Amino acid sequence: MTKLIDSAGLRNDGRKLNELRPIKLEVGILKNADGSAYIEMGKNKIIAAVYGPKEVHPRHLVRPDRAIVKCRYHMASFSTDTRKNPAPSRRETEISKIIRQSLEPSLILEDYPRTAIHIWVEVLQSDGGSRCAGVTAASLALADAGINMRDIVASCAAGKVDGKVVLDLDNIEDMEGETDMPVAIMPNIGDVTLFQMDGIMSPAEFKEAFELAITGCQEIYKLQKQALFTKYFGTDQPQVQEGE
Amino acid sequence: MINLSEIKRKYVIPGELIAQGSYGIRGNMLKIGDKIYATRIGMAEVSTDTIRLISLNGSYMPRLDDIVVGKVINFNAFGWQVDIKSWFPAFLPAANVMGRDYSSSRDSLASQLTIGDQLLAAIAGYDRTRDPMLSISGPGLGKIAEGNTIKVSPSKVPRVIGKKGAMINAIESGSGCRLSIGQNGIIVMVGSADSITKATSALNLIESEAHSPGLTQKVHDILSLGDKR
Amino acid sequence: MVAAKRPILESLRRDHIIELLGKGQRVDGRKLTEQRKLTIETNVIEKASGSARVSLGDTEVIAGIKIELGTPFPDTPDKAILIVNAEILPIASPQHEPGPPDEEVIELSRVVDRGIRESEMIDLSKLVIIPGQKVYAVFIDISVINLDGNLIEACSIAAATALATAKMKSHELSPSGEFKQLEDIVPLPTNRLPVSITVAKIGESLLVDPSMDEESVMDARLTLTTDDDGNFCAGQKGEPGGFSIEEVLQVSEHALASGKEVRELMKKVIEGAKEGKETS
């Protein structure tokens, strides 16, 4: 059993307990998709794409009052340490549902009656926290597609490793740590739209981890905003403009 | 009368608070109490009593009387299904094209318009319960017989037209091409193959750099470069 | 006419393509024998044994190699396992939804497989550990990320480049036949670089590297794979039209010449990867 936190309080990749992995975000990277975004979060490499609003097929799923959302989280066979069978796994099916339900509250679905909005999250390389990275990228892809949204969704996990509460677990920490807690919030509205937990935590640890995850989400939101500004406004700093 | 110097402009993304107070809103925004939030990526213009949000992306949402360019993707005895690059395909009733006394034999429909044909049409009807309805009974509407089409984001259409048509006029005179602009972002270019190529470059430039300053100059440059050959 | 999942091509666009072809020109300004911009990046997926990302015009694909242990097939006890599996991801086009592989994707996987297998790019007999019992299984998984025509070529280049830069752990067999995986990393032994070139036929014109729109107009396509020695090792004709005898020979000459050029680029990228650089 490897020790995941050393005597200096540093983790297996040199991070401090409350430090995020390096994150790279890019919006509008696919030609055909209506909206898209790419994220690297540590070794995670994920593309999210949105198609829609479009017609619903099969027709019996159509809703007269709002859009339906279809979401798939899928891992490439080469994305994990051991090659993954191409057929959808139970884990991917559950995560697809979780991701869909973390993004739906942010979408003003009533503006798009009788339509479907498709969200595809493709994991090219996975290293712990891929569902969070997927939500973060998918939310940008939705904004890039021009879907009416109440807010962006930012996602991050916290957990417990070697008895200490940490932020943004990587794969080793996820496998060998004690608890993993993925979270997503709409940062301006303040609603938590994704919450999962596995492992054992005392009430104090639970509170600490949860609050740490929220802080992580807020950090990530800043990066999401920068990515959108860079793509659409040619600057990553918000500013008030008088001209043009 | 709005004093132009009192308009504050702000880049916004979904979820951001644009302003607080009693404002009328035009465009994609959410009003909660007296707080107004952006629901799209765009430029918000806040004047003394109104806020306008100009979205920088998004697919085309049909509006009554809009002129659009569509492509026939199917037909049945009653009319043609037309892809207008919106959330739903539009429908062009056979009666609109062939008169009320048309006979519903499929051959005569195909001889008017068949799969792959493109047309300039007006949105004749649209509501939340059904697909948009088209009409080609208007001046200049109907099957597009020649030329080629290009798609830009519908949000860029105002930029393609320009102030009082300045941009579209520049592209037409600089390329030698005649343009018809669909509100759904599809643009018809009619002219020689060379002129279509020039117009295509200019339109692609606008699509990719709509937010850049000096875009008008860049478009002029790209069109006059062609002339020097 | 294309039966695969593609949008309906506008008649005006079709006419424009054919009109330009009549003058020996193409919509994007290319010559009939010109390929679109090809970029190749290796080692894009560090967890994979080898990987490559290829963009051919706007078509974009990623191939990843996974090398694992397996039991050989009963009819080839002295050969390692090689499996090629391509997927057109739903992100790649509006016409593609998640689901089991359709005939287009299966043909794509099998044609890429043929080019790699028949060229003997990997000597499968060298990856046997204990004949009849234990062999290496080499998985080549290819994900299409954006679709704009000529998937066979893009996927073949990605698969071959990923293989040529793949690394694996070595192993040793004790005298008693006990298998032990070692920690040191060695290159996957490859000895050849097959290159597939696709030529489309539209009317009387032959054009190289068709875009998606050109594929919607094309009557037929012919893909030929050549190796470093100038031999042909695989071929596939697709779509319902036909090629004349002279045309097939013309395509074969072109596949050889163009294959050489593409191979040079691939070699540059592969050499660069060995020195630690990763992009073309």
Image (tube, coloured by chain):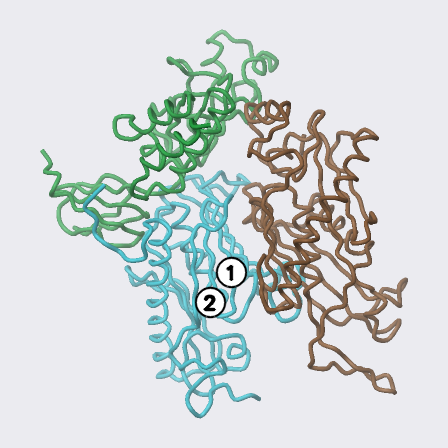
Give the residue at x 71% y 74%. Answer: C186
Local packing at callout 2 (Cα closer than 10 Å; few below 14, some 14-19, many 20+) is many
- Relative side of B47 to B137, left or right: left
Q: Which chain is green?
A: B
The spot of residue A219 in percent (x, y) is 34, 68
Q: Earlier in the sequence, mark 1 or mark 2?
A: 2
Q: Quick one: SS at disc 1?
A: strand
Local packing at callout 1 (Cα closer than 10 Å; few below 14, some 14-19, many 20+) is many
The spot of residue A10 in percent (x, y) is 43, 85
Q: Nearer the viewer, residue B59 or A92?
A: B59
Pointers 1 and 2 within a single chain: yes
Q: Are marks 1 and 2 in contact (CB under 8 Å)?
A: yes
Q: Which residue is mark 2?
A: A41
Apparent colour of chain C = brown
Chain ID, mark 1: A
- Relative side of C11 to A234, left or right: right
Q: Amino acid at mark 2?
A: Met
Q: Quick one: SS at disc 2?
A: strand
> As drawn, which residue projects farthest toward the top?
B101
The N terminus of chain C is located in which quarter? top right
Apparent colour of chain A = cyan
Q: Which mark is residue A46?
A: 1
Give the residue at x 73% y 56%. Answer: C84
> As drawn, which residue projects farthest toward the bottom?
A7
The spot of residue B188 in percent (x, y) is 44, 24
Calculate the distance from the C-alpha at mark 1 to the C-alpha at mark 2: 9 Å
